[in-house]
Image (cartoon, grey):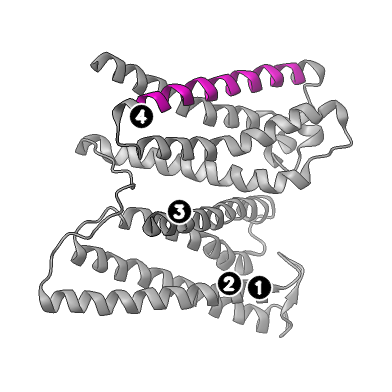
Amino acid sequence: MKNRCLFLSLNILLYFLSSAGVFYFFYYFFTDVIVNSAQDIDVTFPVLILTILPIYSFFLYHFSLRINDKLKFYKSSIIHCSILTFLALYIIIHLLFAIYFNFDGVAINQQFTNFFPLDFILYATFALVIFVTLLTLSIIKFKKLRKNDELEERNMPKFLVKINLAKKGKIPYLILIIIYLLFAMYFFMQGLLGVFWIDYTMTLNLLGSLIILILCFAPTILIIIYYFGYSMKREEKKNKFYLISLINTSSVFLLLLILYVIQLSVNKMFVIESLQAFFPIDFAASINIGPFILFLLMAIPILVATIIYLKRLRKK
């Protein structure tokens, strides 16, 4: 029970931090590198790297849990923690130079937050302390294992989901999962911020805005349902959970789609008028590709789950 609570707590924390990292990476990459033609890349570059740190940590955490060999586990930890430590140290040094040269020794700047780059240096320092601690512990444990020549399997929590795939399909499958997770993280953070971005005064567009807000959280909710279902051991219970989840998620998807069509019939330009902060590309190009991506991110898992469920029924 303690392992389960620890795993879930770390998952929630890393997912939240990774969502912020993915969102701000693409936000600053779009605004600075694309829109501003990389004019402030000397300051933005270390910040972009800083946003990658929690994302790197999230995937490292999940993939490391699947390594059963103790020696390989700590060897992998040493390599990745060394990379993370180097990146955190680089960010701190780069931003300290930015204070001295770019801001004439003044730490306060309005470019990112009111306290940039001090806040980013503190964050990177905190990350550095964690990575160095993990690196030190991994090296100590790795040396101990090599000395004693212990190659026993590391005990994994029983509730973790094991992906048993053929070697040929494993890499493409994992790539698709990573891509979907990145999209889910981005829109999750966008949904959290979107609560304050929506223009509630435009009642004509309010229905569509709320639909988009719900769709932002949908990929994350579907991921939770997916892992919760696969963690079940009993096949009967798992199949029942699958069926109930499919009915509920499909019903919600169809309802949102119908309401979205109704909103478009009232005002086709509601995304550009009320959701500029949600979809800056849509606003700049006067298109509605953002909502299409959100509906697609909800439709794909439902379709895949339906196919898997039908295959399970055929086996019976």
Image quadrant assignment for residue 273 = top right
Q: Position of residue 49 (x, y in %)?
A: 52, 64
Q: What stretch is highlighted in magenta?
A: 238-263
Mark-to-mark CA distance, 3 and 1: 28 Å
Picture coordinates of residue 253, whole percent (x, y)? 58, 23
Q: Which of marks 3 and 1 is in front?
A: 3
First in residue order: circle 4 vs circle 2: 2
Q: In this view, does 35 lie to the left or right of 52?
A: right
Label 3 Cα crowd, 10 Å radius (few <14 / some 14-19 / many 20+): few
Q: Position of residue 123 (x, y in %)?
A: 58, 72
Was residue 260 drawn as part of the magenta stretch in this picture? yes
Quadrant placement of the N terminus: bottom left
Nearest to viewer (mark 4 / mark 2): 4
Q: Which of marks 2 and 3 is in front?
A: 3
Q: Which residue is depicted at the point 44% across and 56% down? A: 5
Residue extending furthest toward the left: 149
Dot 1 falls on a residue whose secondary structure is helix
Q: Mark 4 points at which residue?
A: 238
Q: Answer yes or no: is residue 304 visible.
A: no
Label 2 belongs to which residue? Answer: 123
Q: Marks 4 and 1: which is nearer the front?
A: 4
Q: Earlier in the sequence, mark 3 or mark 1?
A: 3
| Residue at mark 4 to residue at mark 2: CA–CA distance | 42 Å
Tell me which label, 2 or 3, sits earlier in the chain: 3
Q: Which of marks 3 and 4 is nearer the N terminus?
A: 3
Q: Mark 3 points at which residue?
A: 8
Inspect the image, locate mark 2, and give the three-letter code of the amino acid beneath it: Tyr
Q: Which residue is drawn at 64% across and 30% down?
A: 291
Whether 274 is among the magenta residues is no
Residue for badge 1 = 119
